[in-house]
Image: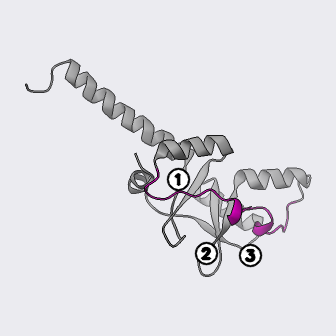
Amino acid sequence: MKAENILESKGREVFSIHVEAIIADALQVMNENNIGALMVLDDRKAIHGIISERDVMRTCHRSQGSCRGLAVKDVMTPREKLIVARAEDDINDLMAAMTQKHIRHIPVVDEKDKVVGMISIGDIIKAMLQEKDFHIRHLTDYIESKYPL
């Protein structure tokens, strides 16, 4: 299964925040949309990075809870460290990268480096479970001779 298959199923909506915003704004968007990460973009929709709940938590911990007024750009994972996917990438490879790098979200970009979707580890697990259920159902039908000969 490819990243494209997950995006077709879940949709391509990507939540983002402006690079000049503050953490409180990012947390509000994440909370309102029940999501764990936001793309950080500029006015031209160019990628500057990604900010996750984990980024905010670590920053607040390091500053002993004093995150008020901090800028998103000071907390985010910057573009040069960002792992991205392409629509044709296999989800097994994405899951391996997420596991190895301890990340839960990977943006999907096109050939012009524009964000076309976001895939979470939860999206991958859901897709893999659906695929396994499909195979189990068809193998069971085959074993039970439900297919005409």
**Residue 46 numbered mark, or none:** 2
From this view, report whether residue 147 is shown above or below residue 83.
above
Residue under pointer 1:
119
**Region rendered in magenta:** 67-89
Q: Residue at x 48, y 69 (%)?
A: 111
Q: Position of residue 30 (x, y in %)?
A: 64, 59
How far apart are the alpha carbons under marks 3 and 2?
A: 13 Å
Earlier sequence position, callout 3 versus callout 2: 3
Earlier sequence position, callout 3 versus callout 1: 3
Q: Residue at x 43, y 58 (%)?
A: 11
Residue nearest the observer in this picture, 89 or 149: 89
Q: Quadrant of residue 71?
A: bottom right
Q: Residues within 10 Å of mark 2 (few under 14, many from 20)?
A: some
Give the residue type that dot 2 points to. Ala
User: In this rendering, which labeled residue sits more in front, label 3 or label 2?
Assistant: 2
Which quadrant, please, contains the C terminus?
A: top left
User: In this rendering, which labeled residue sits more in front, label 3 or label 1?
Assistant: 1
Main secondary structure of the magenta stretch: loop
Residue under pointer 3:
20
From this view, report whether residue 121 is shown above or below residue 85.
above
Q: Position of residue 64 (x, y in %)?
A: 92, 52
Give the residue type that dot 1 points to. Ile
Judged left or right of residue 142, residue 57 is right
Q: Quadrant of residue 73?
A: bottom right
